[in-house]
Amino acid sequence: MAAMAATPIRVQQFLQNLPLFSELTGDEVDRLAAATAQVRAPAGSLLFRRGDPCIGFHVIVYGQIKLALAGRDGAEKVVEVLGPGQSFGEAVMFLERPYVVFAEALSDSMLLFIGKSAILAEIEHNPRFARKMLAGLAMRLHRLMSDLEAYSLKSGTQRVIGYLLRDAPEESAAGTRLAIELATSKGVLASRLNITREHFSRILHELSAAGLIEVHGRHVTVLDLARLRSYTP
Amino acid sequence: MAAMAATPIRVQQFLQNLPLFSELTGDEVDRLAAATAQVRAPAGSLLFRRGDPCIGFHVIVYGQIKLALAGRDGAEKVVEVLGPGQSFGEAVMFLERPYVVFAEALSDSMLLFIGKSAILAEIEHNPRFARKMLAGLAMRLHRLMSDLEAYSLKSGTQRVIGYLLRDAPEESAAGTRLAIELATSKGVLASRLNITREHFSRILHELSAAGLIEVHGRHVTVLDLARLRSYTP
DNA sequence: TGCGCCCTTTGACACAGATCAAAGTCGGCC
DNA sequence: GGCCGACTTTGATCTGTGTCAAAGGGCGCA
């Protein structure tokens, strides 16, 4: 909390601009800010490990954070990759349980850590805030369900296509192009999609060979949205 | 709501006994009951399909309900199998989204359907209830994460073992036995564990051959808890 | 300009688990 | 008691994806 004193105003502003806190009064945001600490995370550093107790949640100010599960023998499965404005750890905060994932900074990052008790207090006398919190958790559940669906009913190729089309318009004329910048290294992305780097590489190659996309490093161009969407391996 | 009139008292009693509603006052439970409908679901019937709008959530009074995702060509993936006292659909209720899974009764069942507006009203003036709701969703997220972890970093055999040991004591002397009754047909259970019936059958056979379990229909006896826990394929 | 490091691609091969097909097995119901 | 349909097992084979190994890039840094 000491670090916060350096830029006391900005924390309030940042919090107020988050959808989750947007409708709180100035006083309420002030109370939250008083329970908030700024956290600096250099690339590669861990914010917490599986098993650590959870006494609050994080919001990313800038940078990029990876949440992942660690398996035996150093294998890991990336659960989510998050960027500025996104938060994580709310769910564990409401259970009296330790973290199940670990969090690692993929690039130099800055976060706010908001203490559990301040959130619980806010819920106590602000039902609208409680509803937003509920909607937030529900949204997360929804996303997890989508992942589960993708992992169990779709092939690796289909998951990659799904990722490439994640925020493409629903309908699109034949031949519509789309430029995409992969959010992270291909290795991390592959793990996020539950496939190996090698397999991911081969899938990208296969889609290129089919004339559906062009790949240059992290930059991918979808050459025909409609055709990619209906591609069958 | 008409059907409710047949047994007006019992609904209140049942609701009050659920952990979620246990600390509500009589008046509060009454209001909830007024927004509650009894639903009868014969074995094999659908409660809702993917895409249906969600205007409340369900609690099982008796029977057994399966939540599942439908893939192309009739393939399906069982997400959860629920029994008496368990609820489902809370998450979608808080989002303005349609169901993503469908719900089917595995046996003749009876449920309560609690209207969304009554829940929202309760949250509005009862922060402790809001917290319980949050804890409920967080718990669900936690479970889903466990499934995700199992699906992505464990083998089919390990998932089956995990299921058999789901509520076995943490520590146990060598040679401890455990009697288990499978909750559903092996086909449904296999899908829940994300493997095919055939593969599930073979895994059970393999564990039997290794002298770790004995299988008689739906009745499974673990012959040595400790040894099963540390079994490596 | 070139060295070193990390990320990525490519190839050959192995394997868990799926699929297809057919034979059991069990319990309910007339 | 015996037949039917649903569930389960078993066998043979196929295949998507992982693993292991080695060769390429690309890019910051000296």
Image (cartoon, coloured by chain):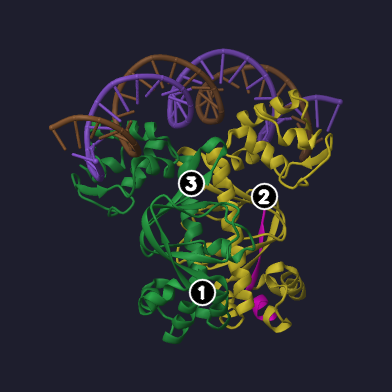
Chain colours: A green, B yellow, C brown, D purple
Q: Are marks 1 and 3 on the same chain?
A: yes
Pointer 2 indicates a residue of which chain?
B
Q: Nearer the viewer, mark 2 or mark 3?
A: 3
Pointer 3 indicates a residue of which chain?
A
Secondary structure type for disc 1: helix
Residue A117 in the image, given as x and y percentages of width and height: 58, 74
Which residue is located at x 39 percent, y 43 percent? A188
Residue A149, numbered label:
3
Horizontal relation, residue A2 to residue B142: left or right: left
Task: Find disc 2 in the rendering and name its residue.
Answer: B43
- Kindly report the distance in space between the C-alpha atoms of the residues bearing marks 2 and 1: 35 Å
Q: Nearer the viewer, mark 2 or mark 1?
A: 1
Q: Is residue B180 above or below residue A41?
A: above
Which residue is located at x 72 percent, y 76 percent? B23
Q: Which residues are magenta?
A: B30-43
Residue D10 in the image, given as x and y percentages of width and height: 67, 19
- Kindly report the distance in space between the C-alpha atoms of the residues bearing marks 2 and 3: 25 Å
* Figure quadrant of residue A175: top left
* Figure quadrant of residue A231: top left
Magenta stretch containing residue B35, yes or no?
yes
- Kindly report the distance in space between the C-alpha atoms of the residues bearing marks 1 and 3: 27 Å
Disc 2 marks which amino acid?
Ala
Secondary structure type for disc 3: helix
Task: Find disc 1 in the rendering and name its residue.
Answer: A131
Q: Are marks 1 and 3 in contact (CB under 8 Å)?
A: no
